[in-house]
Image (cartoon, helix red, strand yellow):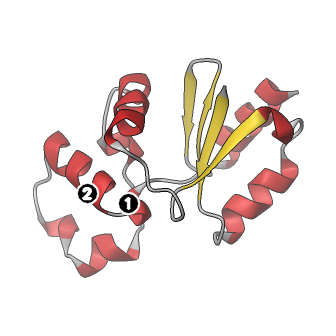
Amino acid sequence: MNKIYYLASCDTCRKIIKSLPNADNLEFHDIRQNPINEDELEEMQSLSRSYEALFSKKAQLYKSLDLKNKSLTEADFKKYLLEHYTFLSRPVFIIDGKIYIGNSQKNVNEVIAVLK
C-alpha cells in the first residue's frame, strides 16, 4: 500500500493533500496521532539511504535544543526521529517503492505525476 506520513495540523500538508489526484489510494498516517515506529523509520531509511535526509532542520525543537551547533551522526538523527514527530521532514510519501521527502514544489509535482 502506498503511504503518506503527514501532520494533520500542518497547513502545508493539508494543502498538498488537497492537490493530490487519487489520494484515496494512499494510506494516511498522521505522525502526531500515531508516531512512527522503528520498523517504519527503517523502511524510510532504506529507501532514502539516510536518516539525515528524513530529518527536518526547520523544526522549532531543532533550534531550541541547539542541535545546529552539534555534530549529529546518523544514530543521532535516528534517535531524534523516533523521539519526536516534529523532526520528520513532512510529508513523506512512499509510492511504488520510491520515497518522496518534504514539501518542495519539485517533490509535490513528482508525487502528483506518479499518482495520476
Q: How many marks?
A: 2
Element assignment for label 1: helix
Residue 43 is tagged as: none
Q: Residue at (65%, 18%) from the top-left corner?
A: 96
Q: Nearer the viewer, residue 76 or 42?
A: 42
Residue 87 is tagged as: 1
Name the outermost residue toward the bottom: 64
Q: Is residue 91 left or right of residue 110?
A: left
Q: Is residue 43 above or below residue 108?
A: above
Density class for disc 1 (Cα within 10 Å; few <14, some 14-19, many ≥20) is many
Task: Give percent across and percent down for residue 89.
Answer: 47, 53
Task: Give percent across and percent down for residue 39.
Answer: 36, 34
Please tell me which of labels 1 and 2 falls first in the chain. Answer: 2
Residue 80 is tagged as: 2
Task: Give percent across and percent down for residue 110.
Answer: 72, 32
Task: Give percent across and percent down for residue 11.
Answer: 70, 70
**Looking at the picture, which amino acid does disc 2 mark?**
Tyr
Q: Is residue 60 above or below residue 2?
A: below
Element assignment for label 2: helix
What distance separates the C-alpha of mark 1 from that of mark 2?
7 Å
Identify the image quadrant of the C terminus: top right
Q: Is residue 71 left or right of residue 55?
A: left
- Labelled pair 1, 2 in contact (Cβ < 8 Å): yes
Q: Residue at (54%, 63%) from the top-left corner?
A: 33
**Looking at the picture, which amino acid does disc 1 mark?**
Phe
Name the outermost residue toward the left: 71
Q: Residue at (34%, 31%) from the top-left corner?
A: 42
Q: Is residue 58 above or below residue 98?
A: below
Q: Is residue 82 left or right of residue 17?
A: left
Q: Residue at (42%, 36%) from the top-left corner?
A: 40
